[in-house]
């Protein structure tokens, strides 16, 4: 028998710290179904709000983006000094032509004290949940009181989550749908059947916004576009503009931004990626966390147009991963344990651990 034919020396049993919980797509779906989607969305909204209330405690930086002609790949890191989190996420609108997701993601949550990861998780589904929860949080603080009707322009992968989050958190009972792809609208109508929402498919964006107190725009094309024109937005409306999320991609006519009070997550990132990239650098914005903590005014009058220029920020992903980590504590067997961390008996002898695993002979 040659050296390569002989078995390796068995590795001593790793300690518990060598194993990191991994939440797969399947495990994430089981967890959401156990909790219930409306409850999960409401819990996430509250978790994000709690972290926004302690906004100054977090490290903040615009996401690190690698842009190409057809999409973007990004890293989104943050830390509150006790935990560190990052998300890897892409955005490739043309992927759907090949049967692929426009957005995919995974994330890591770690202890700052040791650097050891606590959790490794899929975040394609989790990002959809946290994006919807952030929209609901913005509407909770900025939308007209008693708003019941929402217009959803762009009926792709995010649409159902947005409608259900606004139902669970704000109490909307009607959603008016429009997409340039009638098939996307039909899909959304099917998926929201039985949700308790009155679902109205529309043939134009102009029709969709009629009677809506909340307008959500969430389209995928990576370009400067006008999904919502100035004459479509009346007094007293709240807009969640969440589709403009990279340089060169917008959805609103600049005249709307000139009339609206604009609220953002993190201005240095939003001015690069959000709707306000169309506006002068001095265009005034208010940070949403300041409204939540009472340091700044939100909706000041019934006729005010409020605009949440949401691009997605790392603190929201941190909140989502913390929510997931806590939820796993009550879900036995939900996560797969990965042997991810090298764990030598002597922390200084990584080489020795490797050599002891070599084939005998």
Image (cartoon, rainbow, N blue to C red):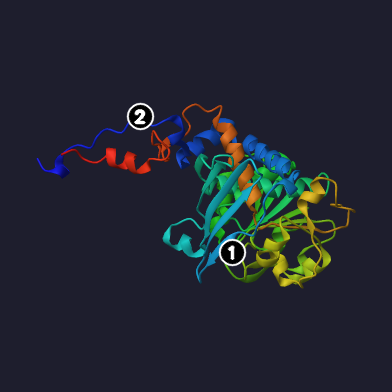
Whether residue 58 sits left or right of residue 261 in the image: it is left
Helix, strand or loop for disc 2: loop
Q: Residues within 10 Å of mark 2 (few under 14, many from 20)?
A: few
Q: Position of residue 115 (x, y in %)?
A: 53, 43
Reply above or below: 272 against 298: below
Please report the residue visible at 73 percent of the width from the left and 61 percent of the height from the top: 267
Whether residue 352 is visible to the viewer of this picture, yes or no, is yes
Q: Nearer the viewer, residue 160 or 320?
A: 320
Q: Nearer the viewer, residue 311 or 33?
A: 311
Location of residue 260 (image quadrant): bottom right
Please report the residue visible at 50 percent of the width from the left and 43 percent of the height from the top: 121
Q: Nearer the viewer, residue 218 or 89?
A: 89
Quarter of the picture holding the N terminus: top left
Location of residue 80 (image quadrant): top right
Q: Position of residue 18 (x, y in %)?
A: 43, 35
* Residue at mark 2: 13
Considering every residue shown, the one lying at the far left of the view is 1
Q: Position of residue 226 (x, y in %)?
A: 68, 70
- Are circles 2 and 1 on residues that touch, CB within 8 Å? no
Which one is in front in this view, the residue at disc 2 or the one at disc 1? 2
Distance CA(mark 2)–CA(mark 1)? 57 Å
Reply above or below: 239 against 80: below
Please report the residue visible at 50 percent of the width from the left and 69 percent of the height from the top: 70
Helix, strand or loop for disc 1: loop
Q: Position of residue 320 (x, y in %)?
A: 61, 43
Quarter of the picture holding the C terminus: top left
Whether residue 198 is visible to the viewer of this picture, yes or no, is no
* Residue at mark 1: 180
Q: Earlier in the sequence, mark 2 or mark 1?
A: 2
Q: Residues within 10 Å of mark 1 (few under 14, many from 20)?
A: some
């Amino acid at each position: 028998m040659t050296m390569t034919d002989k078995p390796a020396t068995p590795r001593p049993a790793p300690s518990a710290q060598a194993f990191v919980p991994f939440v797969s797509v399947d495990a994430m779906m089981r967890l959401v179904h156990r909790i219930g989607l409306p409850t999960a969305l409401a819990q996430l909204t509250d978790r994000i709000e709690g972290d926004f209330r302690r906004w100054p405690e977090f490290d903040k930086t615009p996401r690190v983006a690698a842009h190409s002609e057809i999409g973007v790949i990004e890293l989104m890191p943050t830390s509150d000094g006790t935990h560190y989190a990052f998300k890897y996420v892409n955005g490739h609108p043309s992927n759907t032509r090949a049967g692929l997701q426009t957005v995919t993601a995974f994330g890591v949550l770690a202890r700052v004290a040791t650097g050891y990861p606590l959790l490794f998780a899929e975040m394609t589904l989790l990002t959809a949940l946290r994006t919807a929860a952030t929209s609901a949080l913005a509407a909770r603080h900025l939308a007209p009181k008693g708003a019941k009707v929402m217009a959803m322009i762009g009926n792709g992968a995010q649409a159902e989550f947005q409608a259900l989050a606004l139902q669970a958190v704000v109490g909307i009972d009607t959603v008016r749908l429009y997409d340039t792809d009638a098939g996307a609208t039909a899909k959304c109508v099917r998926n929201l059947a039985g949700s308790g929402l009155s679902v109205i498919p529309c043939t134009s964006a102009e029709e969709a916004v009629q009677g809506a107190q909340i307008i959500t725009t969430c389209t995928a094309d990576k370009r400067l576009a006008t999904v919502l024109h100035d004459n479509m937005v009346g007094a007293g409306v709240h807009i969640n503009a969440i589709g403009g999320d990279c340089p060169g991609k917008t959805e609103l006519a600049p005249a709307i931004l000139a009339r609206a009070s604009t609220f953002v997550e993190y201005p240095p990132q939003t001015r690069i990626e959000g709707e306000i990239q169309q506006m002068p650098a001095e265009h005034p914005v208010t940070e949403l966390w300041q409204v939540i903590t009472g340091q700044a005014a939100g909706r000041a009058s019934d006729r005010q147009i409020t605009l949440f220029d949401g691009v997605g920020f790392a603190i929201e992903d941190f909140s989502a991963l913390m929510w997931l980590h806590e939820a796993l504590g009550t879900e036995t067997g939900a996560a797969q344990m990965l042997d991810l961390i090298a764990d030598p008996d002597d922390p200084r002898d990584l080489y020795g651990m490797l050599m002891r695993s070599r084939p005998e002979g």
